[in-house]
Amino acid sequence: QVQLVESGGGLVQAGGSLRLSCAASGRTFSSYAMGWFRQAPGKEREFVAVVLWNGATRYYANSVKGRFTISRDNAKNTVYLQMNSLKPEDTAVYYCAGTRTSGSFVLRSSYDVWGQGTQVTVSS
């Protein structure tokens, strides 16, 4: 089973950009579909994006479509989330997660490996 470590969070002004990274340990990274979720204070953790095993198939939440891009580099065991045109409502702790099942990728329960999270704060 892989272990996940996120990085790249921080404070940015509205309209700015950040790139999050999630580095995975272990030899089986390419067998995981990798997703990003986020959790704002007082809210449920919500799906943001997922990239499937081959990197070619990606799905996004409607709230981030057109602004965020998920990608992966299996040679580096890393998944990325490029976030552009950030809004204050994007403020949250962002988590990467992995799954080897083919269930619904928007559900938290489909993922069995989670990182510790990285804070993203967007000021207005």
Image (tube, helix red, strand yellow):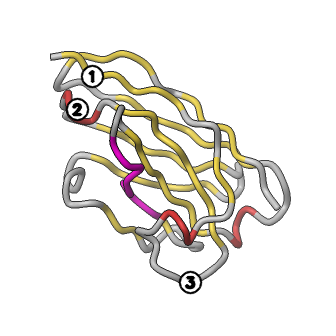
Callout 1 amino acid? Val
Q: Which is more foreground, mark 3 or mark 2?
A: 3
Q: Are marks 2 and 1 in contact (CB under 8 Å)?
A: yes
Q: Give the CA separation, mark 2 to mark 1.
A: 7 Å
Name the chief secondary structure element in magenta.
strand
State yes or no: residue 115 in magenta. no
Q: N-terminal of the two: label 2 or label 1?
A: 2
Q: Are marks 3 and 2 in contact (CB under 8 Å)?
A: no
Kindly identify which residue carries mark 1. Answer: 122
Residue 116: x percent and y percent? 63, 37
Name the quarter where the C terminus is drawn: top left
Residue 70: x percent and y percent? 42, 54
Kindly give the residue lying farthest to the bottom in the view shown: 102
Residue 92: x percent and y percent? 37, 33
Residue 21: x percent and y percent? 55, 38
Element on which disc 2 rests: loop
The stretch of residues the image draws in magenta is 43-50
**How would you rate the neighbour count of disc 1 (Cα within 10 Å): few for under 14, some for 14-19, many for 20 or more?**
some
Q: Residue at x 30, y 47 (%)?
A: 68
Q: Is residue 56 above or below residue 67?
A: below
Task: Name the side, left or right, on which 105 lies relative to 62.
Answer: right
Based on the displayed image, in which of its 4 quarters is residue 11 positioned?
Answer: top left
Q: Looking at the image, which is closer to me, 94 or 7?
A: 94
**How would you rate the neighbour count of disc 2 (Cα within 10 Å): few for under 14, some for 14-19, many for 20 or more?**
many
**How would you rate the neighbour count of disc 3 (Cα within 10 Å): few for under 14, some for 14-19, many for 20 or more?**
few
Kindly identify which residue carries mark 3. Answer: 102
Q: Residue at x 24, y 24 (%)?
A: 16
Kindly identify which residue carries mark 2. Answer: 86
Q: Give the CA separation, mark 3 to mark 2.
A: 30 Å
Q: N-terminal of the two: label 3 or label 1?
A: 3
